[in-house]
């Protein structure tokens, strides 16, 4: 995803009062199916500026057209990792109703005001949890970002469901709390 688009998505809660996921849920309850109709609806009924309305509409329609479940596709040849992902996903979503989940082709981003976590099946036997945590040195399971580069400051490798323990939950919660 291009950086400008990600910035717009990150700014949606502050600028429009709802996350992208919340806008998608609201639009799913309407019968609107055309870009112009959706933009007009968002502007007139919800006071959303044209730029944000355009972005919300385009992403909603793109999501509606996607015939493949992006998360399921990530785990097609890595089925043993899916229960681990589901456990991590459930925990992250439990942190607050302000968590927006954004599946992509190779990973799932978790966004509050900004992306704070990214989960991806990196190999057939390992899930990497990328986290954004400022001013913390790698320690314990918390490593430097590795393959995530600037997208995340740290990562945690999960090879088995038992690896998703209290230490991992603590670091995910820290990233979530710092993302506001």
Image (cartoon, rainbow, N blue to C red):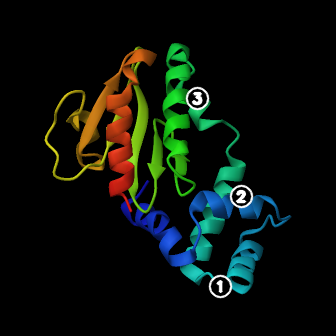
Is 136 left or right of 21, judged from the image as shown? Answer: left
> Which residue is rendered at x = 40% and y = 59% of the image?
114
Assign the C terminus to one quadrant of the image. Answer: bottom left
> Which residue is rendered at x = 66% and y = 67% of the image?
57
Which residue appears farthest toward the left when viewing the image? 137
The relative height of residue 90 versus residue 165 in the rendered view (above or below) is: below
Crowdedness near tag 1: few (<14), some (14–19) or many (≥20) residues, C-alpha within 10 Å: few
Task: Report the disc number at residue 73.
Answer: 3
Is 57 left or right of 76, judged from the image as shown? Answer: right
Which mark is first along the chain, 3 or 1?
A: 1
Crowdedness near tag 3: few (<14), some (14–19) or many (≥20) residues, C-alpha within 10 Å: few
Q: Looking at the image, which is closer to me, 13 or 53?
A: 13
Residue at numbered disc 1: 47
Q: Secondary structure at mark 3?
A: helix
Residue at numbered disc 2: 25
The relative height of residue 87 versus residue 153 in the rendered view (above or below) is: above
Gap in angstroms between the C-alphas marked 1 and 3? 36 Å
> Which residue is rendered at x = 61% and y = 29% of the image?
72
Q: Secondary structure at mark 1?
A: loop
């Amino acid at each position: 995803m291009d950086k400008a688009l990600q910035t717009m998505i990150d700014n949606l809660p502050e600028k429009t009062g709802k996350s992208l996921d919340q806008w998608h849920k609201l639009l799913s309850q309407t019968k609107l199916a055309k870009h112009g109709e959706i933009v007009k609806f968002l502007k007139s009924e919800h006071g959303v500026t044209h730029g944000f309305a355009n972005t919300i509409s385009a992403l909603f329609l793109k999501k509606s057209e996607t015939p493949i479940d992006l998360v399921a596709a990530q785990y097609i040849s890595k089925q043993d990792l899916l229960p681990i992902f589901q456990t991590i996903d459930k925990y992250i979503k439990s942190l607050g109703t302000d968590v927006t989940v954004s599946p992509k082709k190779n990973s799932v981003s978790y966004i509050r005001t900004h992306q704070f976590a990214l989960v991806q099946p990196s190999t057939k036997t390992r899930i990497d949890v990328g986290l954004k945590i400022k001013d913390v040195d790698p320690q314990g399971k918390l490593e430097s970002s590795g393959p995530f580069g600037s997208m995340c400051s740290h990562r945690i490798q999960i090879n088995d469901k038992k690896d998703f323990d209290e230490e991992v939950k603590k670091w995910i919660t820290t990233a979530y709390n710092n993302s506001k």
